[in-house]
Image (spheres, helix red, strand yellow):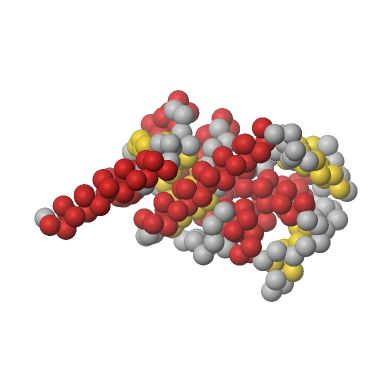
Amino acid sequence: QTQKTDFLSLYHCQKRKNRRKIKMKKILIIEDDANICTLEKDYLEANGFEVSTAADGNNGLETALSGNFDLILLDIMLPGMDGMEVCKAIRKKKDIPILMVSAKKEDLDKITGLGYGADDYIVKPFSPKELVARVIAHISRYERLTAKNENSDAKTIETDGLKLDGRARRAFVNGKELTLTNKEFDLLYFLASSPDTVYSKEELFSKIWNYDSIGETSTITVHVNRIRDKIKEVDPSMDFIHTVWGKGYRFSK
């Protein structure tokens, strides 16, 4: 009882402090496990977020499309419509950050989830502090990109049939538009902005995801492979992102 009282006291104190830092960003949690949902909700609220929840895929999708959320925390295994299909449906309508949550650790699940349009992937069990850090990082980066796109200084990069419109955030290969997720475009645009520069996975993780030492740098590999596949679907001869073994990746003509 004493520990519970201490936690509640700390919870409300932290919540008041963070409300002064964050203008009540809105998070939607789509999670069917009530205990996990409550844990996520408590920690996010303690860090100044306004949190809504949904316990199945169908209600989650309806809530996501009808609400004005800053980030969606989406479980993969859901009753009704599963998380992959929910993610795909949301991405068709909204470009806000989607953070997928699952107990599965296999690379195939990560590739599939990110391929449906998720921005990041976190595996259960995870540290609540890590969860909050990822949420804050994704929202902060999304806001910076949105603000930057509203300015006219984002340049267009064109090379060997590839065109990247930085302001409109659109990518084309031989005139055909690619369907890239937010992070896929960010990664490709960042590399293309500094051709022939080698970046390690850790550097890219820090630059694109805006945090380091949190999560798995294998996320970079997944995104690079997805970008390569989408480009090769248009022109199999094109390969702009090159692996430098033991070092990382570089963009080259």
Number of callouts = 0
Question: Which x, y percent locates residue 205?
Answer: 60, 59
Residue 60 seen from this side:
yes
Q: Measured along the vertical axis of the image, is residue 250 above or below residue 186?
A: below
Residue located farthest toward the top when viewing the structure as drawn:
66
Image point 64% across, 63% down: which residue?
Answer: 203
Q: Position of residue 43 (x, y in %)?
A: 33, 49
Q: Residue furthest bottom?
A: 246
Report x, y in % for residue 40: 34, 48
Judge from the rendering whether residue 107 lies leftward or rightward of residue 198; answer left or right: left
Question: Going 61% across and 37% down the picture, which residue do you hit?
Answer: 146
Classify the position of the N terminus by image quarter.
bottom left
49 relative to 238 in the view: left or right: left
Q: Residue 48, image x and y in percent? A: 37, 42
Task: Report if residue 116 is visible in the image.
Answer: no
Q: Could you tell me which residue is drawn at 74 percent across and 65 percent down? A: 198
Who is closer to the viewer here, 71 or 112? 71
Q: Is residue 190 above or below residue 242?
A: above
Asked where in the image residue 252 lies, by quadrant, the reply is bottom right
User: Would you say 98 lies left or right of 248 here?
Assistant: left
Task: Answer with the quarter of the image where residue 248 lies.
Answer: bottom right
Along the viewing direction, whichever of 80 and 185 lies nearer the viewer: 185
